[in-house]
Image (spheres, grey):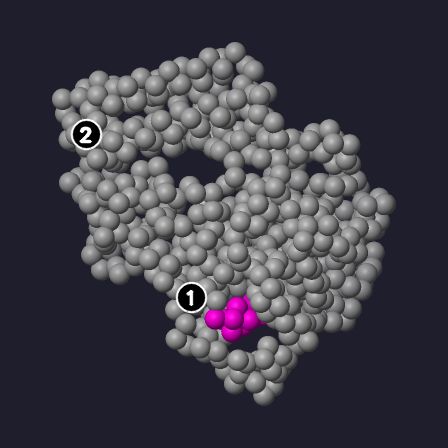
């Protein structure tokens, strides 16, 4: 058995496979702590500053333990990077024979049954979708994995994708005629046989919440669970421990029923008619919400007479649809499954319209065409800690941003991790010499109307001094677009704005054009790794407090007040601190990086809570002078 400290030394097994490897004390310390946690079947929370090398620090002890383990990451991109780049290196140093598997959610795999259902040329499909369908069918003849990510001939959000992939609702499971050839089944079998399974948080909790019926569960099969980017876990877990129902789900169900009635059950006219009626009633419900996409308090909305009446009509309509479908039971396997879906939707609709529920938030969100109704628990601590106790496993939670005010209390509270050991590891970077933090003087208050023109002036000055190479980050889409438009009129650099194309396409273009500037919101505050001279400046418009009209936040604040707590100190500040740390973390990604972080919010110096934010940021030199910042930028070679 290789000793952990020896593994990370030079000479040592890792140094043998990584040219120029030099040991880092923090990386070894984390690896030893993870190894102890695995041995004791305990739980560990680790904040590892940027550059610690945390991925190797948890992969090495987990592989050396010879236990079966899951690594869950924040996004599919990070999942692929871990699986294709980091894991092979550590395996090479320890044991090349270890079986590994990358598992994605079911919407990432082609469904052969749904492909064959529509294979005869479905008259319900639009021309654009038929063209996409032809591309999918051609690719289906050559793929070995069925992973939709391989399919480069159609857009990421192509309309054909819901038609050729399955959902938990419409999957036939073991009753499916294509079960043995199913790509998802094959991927899950491979995962069950693997020593190491790489998933993302959404998939982990889908499996844990038993939403993914029809397949064996992954989570109870493993000895060790590691969450990377663990700061995202509380919000994602809340989503899966709650209940939701969307008009899109009901529309998709009725579309499937109409297709079956028109192709296989032509004598069941009533079935098609009731399904069509259901579609109309769902569209009518969407019409009762504002045109622009929004989120709101569903409990309040439900008190409106026309909304409550429409919900009752939909409930009656679903009941009628179930009754008419039951008459046809046994004639079509897909329809039999759809009867279960109708009943499930009826139960979900009852839950999300029950105004007597305690400890939950009832809220809605709309898209241009659909409405989603949510019931979300205000706390997951009891549920999650109960799951951990019921499993005889080791649990590791790590991220660069878990601490608030130099402690882990906030994260422990959210997750129910009261018995977990904790470890804080500083970044090895020399922030005092590599970076400057500036809070410019003479800033208007964040809600003052004159702040916009001030942001434009500061952005133009920074872009000029850094010759592009800047991320200008915002807390709202509206402010981002307005400032980007005004800046574009004043400078010649290419301006790339989030939302104009995919995140990856924007990043690729930013890296290609050496003078480009990227304007972004939430998507660019984390999970973006731009090293060296490609990023010299990060400007943030204001402290990233969650929108006060967010219905879930409102419910949590209300609940905190009922229990005699201070919601601003206990909920809003900690959330904003973690988000700000993520945004600031975009700047210095390597020991040779240099750059400036400019936060345009004077509350950092005028409010007492500003100190909580400042003490959570890396120890950069600080200044109030933009001239000092411009000089620093111009001196970077």
Q: Quadrant of the C terminus?
A: bottom right
Q: Residues within 10 Å of mark 2 (few under 14, many from 20)?
A: few
Tell me what residue is drawn at x 44 percent, y 77 percent: 95
Instruction: From this view, report whether residue 431 is shown above or below residue 339.
Output: below
Query: What residue sits 77% from the left and 47% below the top?
Result: 601
Residue range corresponding to the magenta coloring: 53-66
- Could you tell me which secondary element the residue under label 1 belongs to? loop
In the image, 97 versus 254, the foreground residue is 97
Q: Residue at x 52, y 11 (%)?
A: 305
Q: Position of residue 569 (x, y in %)?
A: 77, 41
User: Which residue bears the numbered disc 2?
Assistant: 330
Front in this rendered view, residue 132 or 81: 81
Q: Which mark is residue 195?
A: 1
Q: Quadrant of residue 406?
A: bottom right
Q: Is residue 517 visible?
A: no
Residue 255 drawn at (x, y percent): 29, 30
Indicate yes or no whether the magenta region holds residue 75: no
**Dominant SS type (magenta):** helix
Alpha carbons under labels 2 and 1: distance apart: 41 Å
């Amino acid at each position: 058995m290789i000793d952990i400290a020896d593994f990370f030394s030079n000479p040592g097994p890792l140094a043998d496979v990584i040219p120029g490897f030099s040991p880092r004390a923090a990386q070894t310390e984390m690896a030893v702590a993870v190894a102890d946690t695995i041995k004791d079947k305990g739980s560990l929370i680790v904040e590892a500053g940027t550059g610690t090398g945390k991925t190797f620090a948890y992969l090495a002890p987990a592989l050396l333990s010879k236990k079966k383990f899951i690594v869950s990451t924040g996004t599919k991109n990070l999942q692929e990077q871990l699986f294709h780049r980091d894991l092979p290196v550590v395996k090479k140093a320890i044991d090349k024979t270890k079986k590994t598997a990358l598992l994605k959610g079911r919407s990432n795999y082609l469904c052969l049954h749904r492909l064959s259902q529509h294979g005869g040329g479905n008259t319900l499909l639009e021309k654009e979708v038929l063209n996409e369908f032809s591309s999918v069918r051609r690719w289906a003849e050559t793929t070995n994995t069925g992973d939709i990510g391989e399919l480069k001939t159609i857009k990421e959000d192509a309309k054909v994708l819901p038609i050729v992939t399955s959902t938990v609702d419409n999957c036939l499971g073991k009753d499916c005629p294509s079960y043995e050839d199913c790509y998802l089944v094959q991927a899950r079998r491979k995962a069950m046989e693997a020593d190491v399974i790489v998933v993302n948080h959404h998939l982990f909790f889908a499996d844990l919440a038993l939403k993914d019926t029809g397949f064996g569960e992954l989570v109870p099969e493993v000895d060790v669970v590691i969450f990377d980017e663990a700061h995202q876990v509380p919000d994602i877990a809340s989503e899966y421990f709650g209940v939701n129902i969307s008009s899109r789900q009901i529309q998709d169900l009725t579309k499937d029923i109409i297709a079956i009635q028109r192709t296989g059950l032509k004598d069941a006219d009533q079935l098609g008619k009731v399904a069509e009626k259901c579609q109309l009633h769902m569209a009518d419900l969407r019409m009762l919400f504002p045109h622009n996409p929004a989120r709101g308090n569903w409990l309040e909305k439900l008190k409106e007479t026309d909304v409550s009446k429409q919900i009752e009509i939909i409930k009656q309509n679903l009941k009628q649809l179930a009754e008419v479908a039951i008459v046809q039971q046994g004639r079509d396997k897909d329809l039999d499954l759809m009867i279960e879906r109708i009943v499930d939707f009826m139960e979900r609709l009852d839950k999300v319209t029950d105004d007597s529920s305690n400890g939950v938030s009832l809220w809605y969100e709309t898209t241009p065409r659909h409405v989603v109704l949510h019931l979300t628990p205000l706390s997951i601590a009891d549920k999650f800690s109960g799951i951990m106790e019921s499993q005889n496993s080791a649990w590791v939670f790590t991220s660069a941003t878990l601490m608030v005010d130099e402690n882990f209390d906030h994260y422990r509270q959210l997750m129910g991790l009261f018995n977990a050991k904790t470890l804080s590891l500083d970044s090895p970077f020399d922030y005092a010499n590599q970076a400057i933090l500036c809070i410019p003087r003479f800033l208007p208050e964040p809600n003052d109307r004159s702040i916009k023109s001030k942001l434009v002036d500061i952005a133009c000055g920074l872009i000029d001094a850094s010759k592009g190479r800047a991320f200008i980050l915002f807390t709202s889409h509206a402010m981002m677009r307005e400032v980007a438009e005004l800046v574009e009129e004043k400078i010649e650099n290419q301006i790339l704005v989030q939302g104009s194309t995919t995140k990856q396409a924007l990043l690729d273009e930013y890296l290609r054009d050496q003078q480009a500037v990227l304007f972004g919101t939430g998507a660019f505050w984390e999970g973006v790794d731009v090293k060296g001279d490609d990023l010299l400046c990060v400007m943030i418009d204001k402290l990233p407090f969650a929108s006060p009209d967010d219905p879930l936040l409102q419910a949590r604040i209300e609940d905190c007040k009922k229990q005699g707590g201070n919601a601003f100190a206990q909920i809003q500040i900690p959330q904003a601190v973690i988000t700000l740390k993520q945004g600031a973390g975009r700047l210095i990604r390597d020991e040779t990086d240099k750059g400036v972080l400019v936060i345009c919010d004077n509350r950092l110096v005028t409010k007492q809570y500003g100190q909580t934010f400042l003490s959570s940021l890396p120890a950069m030199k600080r200044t109030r002078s933009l001239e000092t910042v411009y000089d620093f930028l111009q001196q970077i070679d």
